[in-house]
Image (cartoon, coloured by chain):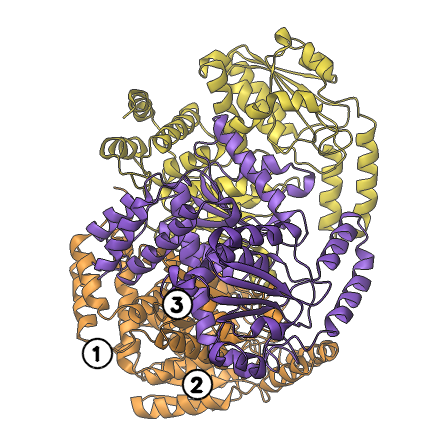
Chain colours: A purple, B yellow, C orange
Amino acid sequence: MDKLTHALIAELGKLETTLHQKDFLLTWLEGDAHLRAVLLAAEILEDLYRQNVSTRVFTSGLAVSNFRDNSTRTRFSFASAASLLGLTPQDLDEGKSQIAHGETVRETATMISFLSEVIGIRDDMFIGEGHEYMKEVSASVEQGFQDGVLPQRPSVVNLQCDRDHPTQSMADLLHLAKVFGGLDALRGKRIAMSWAYSPSYGKPLSVPQGIITLMARFGMDVVLAHPEGYDLLPEPIAVAGMLAAASGGKFTRVHSMEEAFRGADVVYPKSWASFAVMQKRTELLRGGQSGQLQALEKEALAQNARHTAWECTEKLMGATKGGKALYMHCLPADISGVSCKQGEVAATVFERYRKDTYREASHKPFVIAAMMLLTRFAEPARILADLAKSKPPRRAV
Amino acid sequence: MDKLTHALIAELGKLETTLHQKDFLLTWLEGDAHLRAVLLAAEILEDLYRQNVSTRVFTSGLAVSNFRDNSTRTRFSFASAASLLGLTPQDLDEGKSQIAHGETVRETATMISFLSEVIGIRDDMFIGEGHEYMKEVSASVEQGFQDGVLPQRPSVVNLQCDRDHPTQSMADLLHLAKVFGGLDALRGKRIAMSWAYSPSYGKPLSVPQGIITLMARFGMDVVLAHPEGYDLLPEPIAVAGMLAAASGGKFTRVHSMEEAFRGADVVYPKSWASFAVMQKRTELLRGGQSGQLQALEKEALAQNARHTAWECTEKLMGATKGGKALYMHCLPADISGVSCKQGEVAATVFERYRKDTYREASHKPFVIAAMMLLTRFAEPARILADLAKSKPPRRAV
Amino acid sequence: MDKLTHALIAELGKLETTLHQKDFLLTWLEGDAHLRAVLLAAEILEDLYRQNVSTRVFTSGLAVSNFRDNSTRTRFSFASAASLLGLTPQDLDEGKSQIAHGETVRETATMISFLSEVIGIRDDMFIGEGHEYMKEVSASVEQGFQDGVLPQRPSVVNLQCDRDHPTQSMADLLHLAKVFGGLDALRGKRIAMSWAYSPSYGKPLSVPQGIITLMARFGMDVVLAHPEGYDLLPEPIAVAGMLAAASGGKFTRVHSMEEAFRGADVVYPKSWASFAVMQKRTELLRGGQSGQLQALEKEALAQNARHTAWECTEKLMGATKGGKALYMHCLPADISGVSCKQGEVAATVFERYRKDTYREASHKPFVIAAMMLLTRFAEPARILADLAKSKPPRRAV
């Protein structure tokens, strides 16, 4: 067994965590020990996987996913994490269920949880809704467990809501730690989280919100850049400021991609919807006025089109620290001349960093598995230590 | 290991059952020993689950589901049961298959069964069809096994047909046994299976049919109540009468919710479609006249609307035994002022019994797993005894 | 343990194969040893299954399927194979993914592969596309593995493309070997791969292409028959000729079902689209002219209708060797008077060989599992030998 793995397990064992039987909803609701524990557990699971050690800690049980928006990466990451730990992934397709009958969230949450260990939810379409929904599911299963209706209390894992996208931002953080040589090495490094132009509209705000809050917390010099009218939600903005202050990091806001990129160690150029557009859309949908959505979309695209200059070009990359900032993206990116006529990033820039973005994404299954492990077991470090010692093979040897 | 669990396993071992390599389609096709065996096995599986004993009796194999109607509860219960025993759930989505090509039932049934242990089917939309379809699937896999085409003969489990809903009624019976202190304690207890108003139309008849036949058989005083024109199928009505006579129970029919509730120990107020409407709908669909369905639905809803007084109110509950009858529902219920303007049950009544209905539902995964276990193994009690003795952990400890 | 199984494992161990970490795309890209290895491994897996020996060689990991066309048989065969080896089947439903955003094949392929062992693909709708797509997926995951982005390099298994349908043709070959007493017994046997009339249009060419190339290679006397205008792709035609020459078999082409059937030991009457129609359809779809598809379909059906005499009747069967040729079909067949008014085969003929066609199909899950095993493990024979020796039970005993 790799000595490094043992060291990581020992480090994990020293952290005091209280995630057992809890959820993972927003990174800023969790203490530092929890975030460090997730990163460590993810790294350990990656190590054990590569060393062909089985981490099948369950012989049965469901890992339920509820995707209220499209997903490839997160869907497969969630299923992979479930399989890695021995759970059976089961997707709740609301279209095939009886939920249309006016069933309450509490009831659905309970009904899918009798033998479930984890419930992963993506609900990122409407401002003010996704996180609230997850809290309602969480309260429902907690109540069901307290009432003795559920034999265990499944953990709710946020697979992207209107506020945060913790499985993405934690995978991004792990990527940064690996590239720069550890979490401590990130202190003072400048990361430009910048809006970028896209010919599509309605992309969630949760990725930039997740990035600015998490990276500010780990002492980075976070610069948020976007055109006028593309504000993020007030809460994560406030959180980013507070966490930067507490960590000795920085959080500044500018209205110029150039300014954000100047001297940056890391750039994260990505499109998102205008907050006002998202709110309007939410209101229209709530009011059943879906007929006016098309007009809204047209207007939003016209607004976007005024900012096509917000593209991550070679010239802009040249202005970063030594012209060599690390480019990041949650994927799929809108690549100019490849996936669209003009988009978030120049094709040559993306191509140069393509492998990096894939490596960035590769951590997500393990981050999700780490969240599952930490929320399901009281002594995750001891369980990992047992596996690292007994080395049950993951595949036949 | 819990002594009670060992006692239940011993009791199960004494029952003479012949479910091995057979199906579970209608409770009234099964002998008492089979029903008692399902209840016992379900209880044992629940016990072992709570004691963290793995009941993974398969290392591979499929548990196929075919939902021809929407489902949340049963879908997740089936997947949970499969996972609990070590099977891989696999849904047959007829829309994505080649079945539209005019493939025969026999062929489809065989093609999905080469490595399958169980086939769970929901087919409750058309009078005279669901049960017939299940029998055809059953005969097909039996033939395939006899012919040496299939290496094993999968069991067909009825997840709701036009006649019965045995995984629901058996879970309900287990709930009643737990609430009242055993199956024998149910003798003479009065249960009111009553129609209730719903603003939706077309709900299957299988739940009331399953309840009256099963509860009459266990000696309960079963009262069936519904407005004129909401008759159930003749077969289960006849069966309920015969089984009541044989068990020393009672089966009576009234046309008043008040009368049914008076002095009842248990009430089960639930909407169902008018039999005539269901038959008409079946004819229209068979004849390809789906254009006339809307008119039928309108007519049916108008018919329903004449019976909005059939609501389980506080006043009606007050007339039950000591005003404290147990309220039951298969869920989701149409709750007045919650999931609809006016429906099957008053919000305060439902809320008071909400936990009970969730507990009622919690038995379903284990009832389905019990049906799987009993139909797949010649000596289920011995296998459970082995597990209870060797105690393989379900999740890492 | 069955002595025969040990003998088969020993035989497999003698074959020099290099399938480890590779794909299985077209049978004619593989050496004889690879094809023999797949057949042997499939037989061994069948034996072990029937002897209740677990072949769970994985404790976790995904087996991803991507069905770009409908499927029942292959879908369930793939899921069964995955379950048999311990993998979690996970379907990539492109409609629920973010692929519409203009994501590249390389990116999607990488994103679904972080913990995946196998990717099974059906892509048979467009001439010139399916195989190319599979090669692109293959190159993508190879690159991802070389770059260190993927911890393992998943194998791509062709579940039907525009050129070949190897899991079908290999299952067919295994069936023939079992019926005639081994692969060597097939030398000189005459197989008529004949077009047959169907009232539907657009059936892929991959089955006849797979059959003529594979059976010619094993020394059979292959006769391909079809009406004018129903040519197969030039590549498999050329391959069949070359492989027949190399094997001492024969490959001839005729335009008469009667001629093909005369003296045949085996007949495989099956409809397929006219090559010209498929090409036209591909062009229309690529050019976004789906409005003209209806006209094309009408024209194609009219063309088909000129050849209703191409039906596998009793009279035609009477002309085969001793009137007793083995009838084969990949299913579902268009059976005259059963699944359509007039189709590929007379009802009495099909019924007489129905069991045979089911047996033919029964090998597919094991053939797919064999392809998975051989492409995932460097020493598959040794691993099977270990299992045959230690005999872990597949289901509780």
What residue would you read off at disc 2?
A: C223
**In the image, what residue type sits under mark 3?**
Phe
Distance between the alpha carbons at the discs numbered 1 and 3: 45 Å
What residue would you read off at disc 3?
A: A180
Distance between the alpha carbons at the discs numbered 2 and 1: 32 Å
Whether pointer 3 and pointer 2 mark residues with C-beta atoms closer than 8 Å, the reply is: no
Q: Is residue A110 above or below residue B6?
A: below
Residue A203: where, in percent of width, then height? 65, 62
Circle 3 packing at 10 Å, graded few (<14), some (14-19), many (20+), is some
Q: Nearer the viewer, mark 1 or mark 3?
A: 3
Q: Is residue C392 above or below residue C209?
A: above
Q: Indicate which disc residue C16 carries.
A: 1
Dot 3: what SS? helix
Dot 2: what SS? strand
Work out whether residue B24 can be spotted. yes
Residue C87: where, in percent of width, then height? 37, 57
Give the farthest residue toward the top. Answer: B322
| Quadrant position of the N terminus of chain A in the picture | bottom left
Q: Nearer the viewer, mark 3 or mark 2?
A: 3
Chain where mark 2 sits: C
Residues at discs 3 and 2 both on one chain: no
Dot 1: what SS? loop
Depth order, front residue of A52/A45 = A45
Chain where mark 3 sits: A
**In the image, what residue type sits under mark 2?**
Val
Circle 1 packing at 10 Å, graded few (<14), some (14-19), many (20+), is few
Q: Is residue A15 above or below residue A187?
A: above
**In the image, what residue type sits under mark 1?**
Glu
